[in-house]
Image: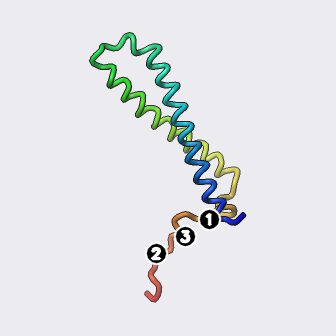
């Protein structure tokens, strides 16, 4: 298996992991909101509570994803196993 295929599989796996974490965060925060806050919030503010749950779930999932990625980067040498997605950063034009 070459580096490009490993990189592609890693990106696909990381995306699926991020979607799973976002879904779990949303479901758990929505359950807590529906169970505890929904009955006591005025009817005019209930939609704002749902929006807050949605945005909070996204923020929490990004935090968990970033933490998991940092943990993985400590365990695995990414330069050794994966191909860079955006290149090495050498932006010089040939001949200049």
Q: Residue placed at 55% from the left, 70% from the top?
A: 88
Q: Residues within 10 Å of mark 1 (few under 14, many from 20)?
A: some
Q: Residue placed at 58% from the left, 51% from the top?
A: 12
SS of the residue at dot 3? loop
Locate residue 93: give its quadrant. Answer: bottom left
Locate residue 34: give its quadrant. Answer: top left
SS of the residue at dot 2? loop
SS of the residue at dot 1? loop
**Exactly how many numbered labels are in the figure?**
3
Assign the C terminus to one quadrant of the image: bottom left
Q: Is residue 31 above or below residue 94?
A: above
Question: Residue tagged by mark 1?
Answer: 83
Is 53 positioned to the left or the right of 27 in the image?
A: left
Q: Residue furthest right?
A: 1
Question: Residue tagged by mark 2?
Answer: 91
* Residue 77 pos. (x, y %): 68, 58
* Residue 32 pos. (x, y %): 49, 19
* Residue 78 pos. (x, y %): 65, 59
Is 9 positioned to the left or the right of 48 in the image?
A: right
Question: Residue tagged by mark 3?
Answer: 88
Q: Nearer the viewer, mark 1 or mark 3?
A: 1
């Amino acid at each position: 298996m070459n580096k490009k295929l490993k990189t592609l599989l890693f990106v696909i796996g990381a995306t699926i992991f991020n979607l799973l974490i976002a879904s779990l965060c949303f479901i758990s925060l929505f359950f807590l909101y529906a169970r505890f806050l929904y009955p006591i919030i005025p009817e005019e503010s209930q939609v704002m509570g749902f929006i807050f749950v949605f945005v909070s779930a996204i923020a929490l999932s990004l935090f968990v994803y970033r933490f998991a990625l940092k943990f993985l980067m400590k365990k695995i040498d990414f330069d050794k196993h994966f191909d860079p997605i955006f290149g090495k950063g050498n932006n010089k034009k040939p001949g200049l």
